[in-house]
Image (cartoon, rainbow, N blue to C red):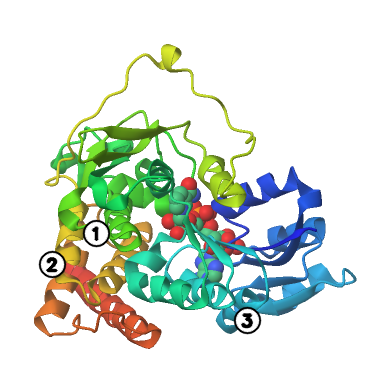
Amino acid sequence: MTRRVSIFGATGSIGQNTLDLIRRRREEFSVVALSGGRNVARLAADAREFGAELAVVADPALHAALKAALAGSGIEAAAGAEALVEAAARPAEWVMSAIVGIAGLAPGLAALEQGATLALANKESLVTAGPLLLAGAARHGATILPVDSEHSAIFQALVGEDVSAVERVIITASGGPFRDWPVSRLARASLEQALNHPNWKMGQRITIDSASMFNKALEVIETKEFFGFSPEQIEVLVHPESLVHALVGFRDGALMAHLGVADMRHAIGYALNWPRRRELPVERLDLARIGRLRFEPPDEARFPALRLAREVMATGGLAGAAFNAAKERALDGFIAGRIGFMDMARVVEAVLETLEASGALRADAVPPLDMVVRADHLARRQADAAMARLENAD
Ligand code: NDP
């Protein structure tokens, strides 16, 4: 019996790594749906190679192009946000959620509703709507497996453990390309410099988020949402080698670390093989050759995203949705050259302050999808206004 799998964000970095693992054991899987954002050529080629039932491109303007690229293959072609949700509702046992941004939330929820095991790379889902996602999984008896390397590491360190015996968790950050840069230099950091990650090869947006530590800020919130730890239990350590992904400290003082080379196929493969462990094509760690592992505290003055994450967790309600949306807009602004590197945190902070003061972040314990989406839109508009103010001030 083959295992039915779907991959959302198949054309991206995580999606391609997932397909690489599936390609190596083709006979075990049958591919239900693959999705891409705009890269029709990649999507169609992969859909043909893996004999997918359905391919979905997120941009509706590319529907005809996808149909043309799949002509004669018998593979269904669909387009748009609703088609993504419909594709995620198609019965599959294992679904990879690797769309970037909040666009990954609704397909992830739909996959849980049909009871699939959701391998969750899209951290934005947990940050914006953690309670909704967990409630969806519980209601439909579905499992969520973390794919972010830090969260996969925590998950693995907790196997067989009593979660109530956990004192603290430590997630590591490489420090990115700007680890040693002073604030004055950070303010002038260029897009090209931000894209130059020392250890990980990832999609463009997460690479810049790593340089600003917004990625780590999302991960801190993700840790709270997914595992239910309190903000005080979650620590961040800068670890330039990126070999220890996370550590879990127990109340007897033991600290369990997860180590591995910086290769996302590790965490993806763990989620694919769970609850078993199977051979993975990743380089083995040679600690004697590496010799030394460094750890240092993060500097929140240079990387204010971490401080903002704590504020988001203290505020609760829709603060995560607003934080993520403001961050996504600020990132667009930085990529477009509208604002500087350090301005991203200024924009996000301004949005959070305005929305909190207006009461717009208050919500019940499990805010529904439409409330999350409204908060997202509101925060994007506020972020645009904050960026316009910064531009005018120049
Ligand atoms: P990429 O940018 O490489 O890929 C993103 C994927 O999402 C692509 O398939 C892209 O399509 C698709 N996409 C983009 N916009 C939309 C949209 N509006 N609607 C639907 N699909 C869209 O990102 P990554 O693979 O690096 O990251 C994916 C997710 O995994 C993110 O949430 C990231 O934070 C998380 N993650 C990534 C890690 C990594 O090492 N890369 C590590 C841990 C987590 P297309 O390219 O065709 O336009």
Cβ atoms at labels 2 and 3 below 8 Å apart: no
Of labels 2 and 1, the one closer to you: 1
Of labels 3 and 1, the one closer to you: 3
Q: Residue at x 27, y 77 (%)?
A: 379
Expressed as whole percent of the image width and height from the top left, the position of residue 186 reads 21, 43
* Relative depth, front residue between 145 and 184: 145
Q: CA distance from mark 3 to mark 1?
A: 34 Å
Residue hosting label 1:
344
The amino acid on which the numbered mark 2 sits, given as a three-letter code, is: Ala
Label 1: few (<14), some or many (≥20) within 10 Å?
A: many
Judging from the image, what secondary structure is the residue with disc 1 in?
A: helix
* Relative depth, front residue between 116 and 268: 116
Dot 2 or dot 3: first in sequence order is 3
Dot 2 or dot 1: first in sequence order is 1
Q: Residue at x 74, y 57 (%)?
A: 46
The amino acid on which the numbered mark 1 sits, given as a three-letter code, is: Met
Residue hosting label 2:
393
Of labels 2 and 3, the one closer to you: 3
Q: Is residue 41 above or below residue 103?
A: above
The amino acid on which the numbered mark 3 sits, given as a three-letter code, is: Glu
Q: Which mark is residue 74?
A: none
Expressed as whole percent of the image width and height from the top left, the position of residue 72 reads 90, 71
Expressed as whole percent of the image width and height from the top left, the position of residue 300 reads 14, 46
Judging from the image, what secondary structure is the residue with disc 3 in?
A: helix
Q: Is residue 166 visible?
A: yes
Expressed as whole percent of the image width and height from the top left, the position of residue 374 reads 33, 85
* Relative depth, front residue between 255 and 20: 255
Q: Residue at x 20, y 80 (%)?
A: 361
Q: Is residue 228 above or below residue 361?
A: above
Q: Which mark is residue 86?
A: 3
Q: Quadrant of the N terminus?
A: bottom right
